[in-house]
Amino acid sequence: MNRIALALLVGAFFSGCYTPPDSPVGGYETDIFKCDNGRDDDGDGQIDCDDDDCLLGGFCGEHIPILPPPGRGHEDSYALCVDGVDNDIDGQFDCGDRGCQSIRELCCAKEFSDVLCSDGIDNDGNGFADCADFACRTNPFVTVCSVELSCGDGVDNDGDRRTDCNDRDCEGASNCIGETNCVDGIDNDEDGMIDCLDAECSRDRACSGPEGTLETCSDGRDNDGNGFADCGDFACSRSMDMAVVDYCAMLAEDTLEKCMDGIDNDGNGFEDCSDFSCSMSLDMAVADYCASIAETTVASCSDGIDNDGNGFTDCADFSCSDSPDPELRRACEASFDSCTDGLDNEGDGFADCNDFSCRSVVEQVFFESPTDTCGDDVDCTDPVYPQCRDGKCGRALNVSPCNESEAGVDPIADPVRARMGAEARCSDGIDNDGDDFVDCEDWECHWNPLLNPRATDPTSTAPSFCEIRCAPDAMFPVRCAGPAAICE
């Protein structure tokens, strides 16, 4: 890496205020070609890897130090994320490292607003556009990714780990209604299965039939429409036909050996202790084995062992970090509460927003209307509270615990108080979210829609809060950032 360029970059970041140009002269230098063509494409006086855009975009190659970085540290600070070194020795460096991507001040992500997350363009060239991009789905200021935009693309558009028809946002979508006619020769729900070949037709009289022969007990269908298919149906597993009984006994995942062989023996989509026939077995040897490897307790989620053998250890395993147990989520520093309690719950040396786990936490908070209710025959008509949940009108918003400008006030229902709170936090001289960036040095203060009109309207010419407070003649200046925090 060009060390002079790096020194200039770091110096620019920590010195004075920065006024971004209205638009680049020749387009930003943000791809491998523009960073290696020997031209000053954006007319800023810096060529290729002397340009901040190329340095921060990771297009200038890795710097291999004479001696390796001491130990296996963390790549999660400004200094470590612009030095061109793979400091944590994980094969990724700077903006290519997930630890750096979570620091929005580094501008590793080019998709960071409602406008950029809904333009149909892969702005940062990482292969994911708009809500398919992790940067959009986990950004607390991006609202266009809070619902499942497509109910048939196989993608979890809103990042809630429920895809397509499994997401309640898709209730009522045509392809989620199901196979409505089981004898019309049409794939009504467009899932690739027609009429009786679709599991949803298994209970339809036209598709039902006896289940008890070797053929019907091995065809993968619920032939008699009782909700159970093949050997999951007593008509098969308790059949008087010994050939059927023997077949089901051969497949059953009900012995200690079969519950630890890594094979889905009964073909039901679950193997070993992920199968209820193992985890809920009446055989105490099997039940005890499954209980011993379950990653569902604070102890098993903090022992450094991949107990259940699914390839994920401790808090990297969803059974730990996504557990409904609040104590377990707290131990994994994976909840709003655990990321604001001042404790290093995960025991990795980083507390709250200094922990990468917290920086990726975005919880959906449902702000209830103080007066309006809703039900089966009553809809929410108030534009401020358009959603109905548990009989109350309200509005769901993404909230991040690691947000310098988060005031804890619903910006839709009470925009005045929310803006005042955001302004106060962005001018108090305190690093509220613990990410080493204070006030207008912090990305959130620059791009909170309450504080920057361009966050929602790129054509706006109105100055942002930080531009006003960072002006040379500002009466009450705040700590201001260099170009890295602007991301324009």
Image: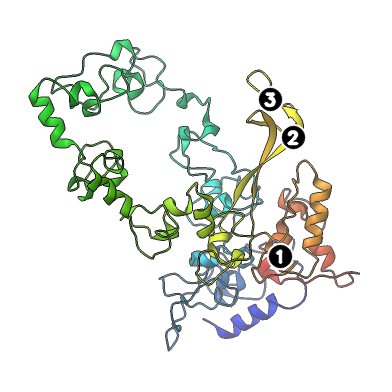
Element at badge 1? loop
Q: Are marks 1 and 3 in contact (CB under 8 Å)?
A: no
Element at badge 2? strand
Alpha-carbon span between mark 2 and mark 3: 10 Å
Looking at the rendering, in which quadrant would you find the C terminus?
A: bottom right
Q: Residues within 10 Å of mark 1 (few under 14, many from 20)?
A: many
Amino acid carrying mark 3 in the image: Cys
Element at badge 3? loop
Residue 343: image quadrant is bottom right
The residue lying toward the viewer, choosing from 154 and 329, is 329
Q: Residues within 10 Å of mark 2 (few under 14, many from 20)?
A: some
Which color mode does the image show? rainbow
The residue lying toward the viewer, choosing from 131 and 251, is 251
Residue at the spot of label 1: 432
Q: Is residue 135 above or below residue 185?
A: below
Residue at the spot of label 3: 374
**Residue placed at 62% from the left, 43% from the top?**
144
Residue at the spot of label 2: 369
**Residue placed at 71% from the left, 57% from the top?**
447
